[in-house]
Image (cartoon, rainbow, N blue to C red):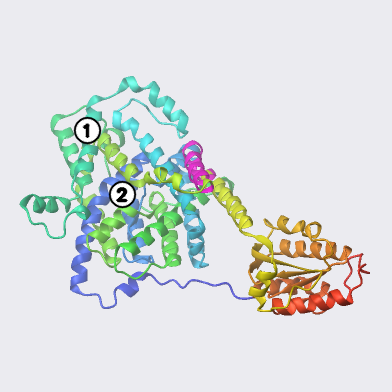
Amino acid sequence: MPPVPIQPFRPRLLDALRGYDRAQLVADLGAGLTVGIVALPLAMAFAIASGLKPEQGIFTAIIAGFLISALGGSNVQIGGPAGAFIVIVYGIVERYGLANLLISTMLAGVLLFALGFLRLGALVRYIPVSIVIGFTNGIAVLIALSQVKDLLGLEIDKLPADFFTQIGVLAQHLHTVNWAALAIGAACLALVVAWPKSYTMPAAPTTAPQRWRRHLAQVPGTVIALAAATAVTALFALPVETIGSRFGGIPQSLPGLELPEFSWASAKQLLIPTLTIALLGAIESLLCARVADNMADIPRHDPNQELMAQGVANFVTPLFGGMPATGTIARTSTNVRAGARTPVAGIVHAATLLVIVLAAAPLALHVPLAALAGILLFVAWNMGEWHEFARLKRFALTYRVTLVGTFLLTVIFDLTVAVEVGLVLACVFFIWRMSQLFRAEPLDDEALRRETGLEAPRPEGVHVLQLYGSLFFGAVGKIEGIPEALPAGTRALVLDLHRLVQLDTTGVDALTQLLRALRKRGVVLLLAELNEQPRSLLHRSGFDVLLDDGAIAPTLADALRRAAASVADTPAASASATGAPTA
């Protein structure tokens, strides 16, 4: 038995530090500072939207961000709390409580580390893109819906996790709209949308407005919106809910190490939440790393090392009260565009957040929740790939059913159900498509001359079928009716298999049944030009022993000569009506 492949633990940081120079340090410092500032409002917003305290999001961004950058397999990936986790975390807290969320996250960390350690990171890439787009768009819809309460300033103690129940509760409390909160949230959303983006600026601005826009683009719009909303709220004492009024502020220090209360009885109930966190974390982190690889001229990421780093981060962060973490596309993209080329930038990003917490935590008291809601609406819009819905008509019905089905199941039920059903649908549709590609076609005399190069006519009583594609459990029905469909007077059937690329055990069983049915009719079966995989399986299954001597020919021409000789030597009524081998 071959040994189980094991991934060596080698963070990309070790390779990146070789030949590290001052120019790289300056670039990484600038990128890290930029991403750290961008991450601050997002970390608070993601935590609050998940039903947690804002500091839990910040501590996750600091601790997990540092560990993922220091131990990961990507040069530029930024880790931390992600929008994709909002719906998942909110549902787990609602159903199982905060303590079980921490346990689920730690167990997911162990699972992620095991996936990377056993070199199973590539398996994540087997999830079809239609499923990824479907659940990503579904999560974006749920994030947007969850922010309606704070955007409108509705007087709702706690939103339920169920989609339709949320809509009903929001509708019942629409009369409690806080117009000041709505104005702040709408203004923040408009500002973030309209704020110039660095990646839309010309490389060499020539006019004064272009230069000003380029300078403004260096400052993240989310930070400007949050700072402006906080200043206006504090200056005019607006009657809106703030971080201070709901949570009492943010601690000006890091939390202490604390083990969550653990029992096997509760752990058994957390299987689905654990699998959901691990699956989503793996998909998001590796998808983010692939996007980053295409954005910059950097070494490609190591998916297994990245998963091990994600595992360590998700195991350690809950010990400090943190939430699940993964790679974040928005912050990673900002990191790359700001000039980062090594994991040092991610470490600087974590250090920047730590300094902000230690020095400026009291300023968060006046941050209006409506402003964070406006920012999250922008995040939700950018998170979804809405153009894919418009492009659905270009693709097959199977693709459309998988994408739309996964989307609706994510919104109505949850991500786990959506991915499970999506994968089942994708597998069923794949089996159906592969079965459609398989075919068994007769070769006429002209086709035989092309295939064999022989000018002699087809031997009398010999029928030739050419098999195409993969003969597997989904396609065996196409050869079950061959005996009844043979022309009258057929004494030998030759199967040309040089275009048969794959065979499974169900296909072997179908060939065995075909052989028995042919023998009952006095027809000899010959096989020609087997590829390596079908030949190996037929030998290992013992099928070749059932055949007559010389029934497997190296070429189609040789098989025709053997078939002609067999027809000449075999009496019309076969003595092998029982299906036993004649050799």
The x and y percentages for residue 147 are: 34, 35
| Drawn side of residue 31 relative to residue 384, left or right | left
Q: Residue at x 12, y 53 (%)?
A: 215
Q: In the rendered view, would you say 176 is above or below 114?
A: above
Task: Give 252 or 513, whichever is nearer the viewer.
Answer: 513
The x and y percentages for residue 24 are: 21, 70
Task: Give 59 or 293, whichever is nearer the viewer.
Answer: 293
According to the picture, the residue beneath numbered tag 2 turns out to be 58
Task: Give 218 or 233, whichever is nearer the viewer.
Answer: 218
Q: Amino acid at mark 2?
A: Ile
Q: For the view shown, which residue lies furthest in the top direction?
A: 175
Q: Which mark is residue 184?
A: 1
Question: Taken as a whole, is the magenta stretch helix, strand or loop?
Answer: helix
Magenta-tinted stretch:
398-417
- First-in-chain label (2 vs 1): 2
The x and y percentages for residue 282 are: 45, 57
Q: Residue at x 25, y 34 (%)?
A: 185
Label 1: few (<14), some (14–19) or many (≥20) C-alpha neighbours in 10 Å: many
Q: In the rendered view, would you say 401 is above or below 450?
A: above
The quarter of the rendered structure image containing the C terminus is: bottom right
Q: Amino acid at mark 1?
A: Ile
